[in-house]
Image (spheres, grey):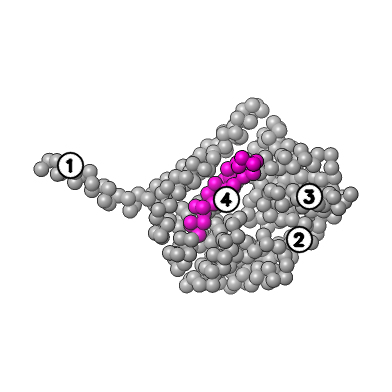
């Protein structure tokens, strides 16, 4: 009898706790990552001497183990609606997490998992009232299949507001495909739908109406072939800076900060470009919205060797309507836009081509 009672007590929690434990586990992992990032920021801010700064920078939390934990929690339950919120976190956090290949290239660590999330959404959640955070996360996805899913959501979801958020995200995705007439028509159609159906929906403190307005500004002033607006500000030592001071040079303009999930890779890529183009008529300029003190420390020990606007209040980023970080523009000597998108090989190829044309 006592043995039976003991087994009952042992089995009872197993029968009834998992239903509530899985969502709680996902929240715990997300909070743990956020706490680790906050602790690292404090450590980096407190570092004074160069060795301490270098050590603090190298201690930046790796999102990979947290993503693996989230996947272990949600991977077998993607047909359940509670997984949509942690899935949105996963979609936002993992695209910049890369593994090195033997040939020297890189491969996304979680490409299959992200694909599984998209398939699960299409199979099980196309009518869910909880899709808005997922749509917002898909807006920044580098996978072209995300656009197809967003367009399907905006066409079929029963809630007009969710349709509108999906339309905004689709417009932001279309931006990466170029500025040809048909693509531009689709962008404008999606933005119109977003404004009409979801203008008052808030995404991380900003309304859809404001985000759509920013996208319209980008179409008008910051698309390929336009002359980019000048930026005027100061560096981390309060010295004046402007884009116009580099007139005649190819400019690689990088909007970034140390808290984006792929910050280490962004720094490595940009440092390699600084080395490659040294002595050529090309300027690399960052716009960084970390605290001025943090940017100053990163530059003082050579971790960040290129020139940066210090933009802790996000004023310059707002002038360029930056919604997805990091973001790169490549301009020719007259500040005409030739590339906009993620840091990497396309930005480098564009800069190389512009330098060759200048010769």
Determine the residue positioned at 68% across, 54% down: 341
Disc 3 designates what residue? Answer: 351
Determine the residue positioned at 59% across, 47% down: 107
Q: Earlier in the sequence, mark 2 or mark 4?
A: 4
Q: Distance from label 4 to label 3 (Cα)?
A: 24 Å
Residue 103 visible to an observer of this rendering: yes
Give the residues drawn in magenta, as a range.
96-118
Q: Residue 95: which disc?
A: 4
Crowding at mark 4 (Cα within 10 Å: few <14, some 14-19, many 20+): some
Disc 1 designates what residue? Answer: 6
Disc 2 designates what residue? Answer: 224
- Residue 126 or residue 46, whichever sits in front: 126
Residue 38 visible to an observer of this rendering: no
Crowding at mark 2 (Cα within 10 Å: few <14, some 14-19, many 20+): many
Q: Distance from label 4 to label 1 (Cα)?
A: 47 Å
> On the rendered image, what quadrant is the N terminus found in?
top left
In percent of width and height, residue 301 lies at: 69, 31
Q: Residue furthest left?
A: 1
Q: Earlier in the sequence, mark 3 or mark 2?
A: 2
Q: Distance from label 3 to label 1 (Cα)?
A: 71 Å
- Helix, strand or loop at label 3? It is helix
Q: Is residue 213 magenta?
A: no
Residue 201: quarter of image: bottom right
- Helix, strand or loop at label 2? It is loop
Determine the residue positioned at 45% across, 49% down: 71
- Helix, strand or loop at label 1? It is helix
- Helix, strand or loop at label 4? It is loop
In percent of width and height, residue 63 lies at: 53, 43
Front tag of 3 and 2: 3
């Amino acid at each position: 009898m006592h043995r039976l009672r003991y087994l009952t007590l042992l089995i009872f929690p197993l029968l009834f706790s998992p239903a509530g434990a899985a969502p709680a586990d996902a929240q715990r992992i997300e909070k743990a990552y956020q706490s680790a990032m906050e602790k690292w920021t404090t450590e980096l801010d407190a570092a004074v001497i160069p060795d301490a700064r270098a050590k603090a920078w190298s201690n930046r939390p790796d999102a990979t183990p947290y993503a693996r934990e989230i996947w272990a929690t949600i991977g077998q339950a993607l047909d359940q609606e509670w997984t949509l919120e942690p899935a949105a976190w996963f979609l936002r956090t993992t695209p910049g997490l890369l593994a090195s290949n033997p040939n020297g290239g890189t491969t996304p660590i979680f490409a299959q998992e992200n694909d599984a999330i998209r398939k699960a959404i299409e199979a099980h959640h196309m009518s869910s009232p909880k899709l808005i955070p997922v749509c917002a996360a898909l807006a920044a996805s580098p996978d072209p299949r995300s656009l197809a899913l967003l367009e399907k959501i905006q066409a079929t979801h029963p809630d007009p507001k969710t349709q509108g958020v999906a339309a905004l995200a689709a417009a932001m995705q279309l931006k990466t495909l170029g500025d040809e007439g048909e693509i531009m028509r689709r962008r404008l159609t999606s933005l119109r739908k977003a404004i009409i159906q979801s203008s008052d929906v808030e995404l991380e403190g900003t309304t859809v109406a404001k985000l759509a307005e920013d996208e319209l500004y980008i179409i008008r002033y910051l698309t390929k072939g336009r002359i980019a607006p000048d930026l005027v500000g100061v560096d981390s030592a309060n010295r004046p800076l402007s884009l116009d001071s580099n007139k005649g040079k190819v400019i690689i303009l990088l909007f970034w900060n140390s808290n984006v999930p792929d910050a280490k890779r962004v720094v490595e890529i940009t440092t390699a470009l600084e080395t490659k183009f040294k002595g050529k008529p090309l300027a690399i300029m960052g716009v960084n919205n970390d605290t001025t003190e943090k940017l100053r420390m990163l530059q003082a020990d050579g971790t960040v060797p290129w020139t940066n606007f210090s933009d802790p209040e996000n004023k310059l980023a707002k002038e360029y309507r930056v919604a997805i970080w990091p973001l790169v523009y490549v301009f020719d000597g007259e500040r005409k836009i030739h590339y906009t998108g993620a840091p990497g090989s396309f930005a480098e190829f564009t800069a190389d081509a512009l330098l060759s044309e200048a010769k």
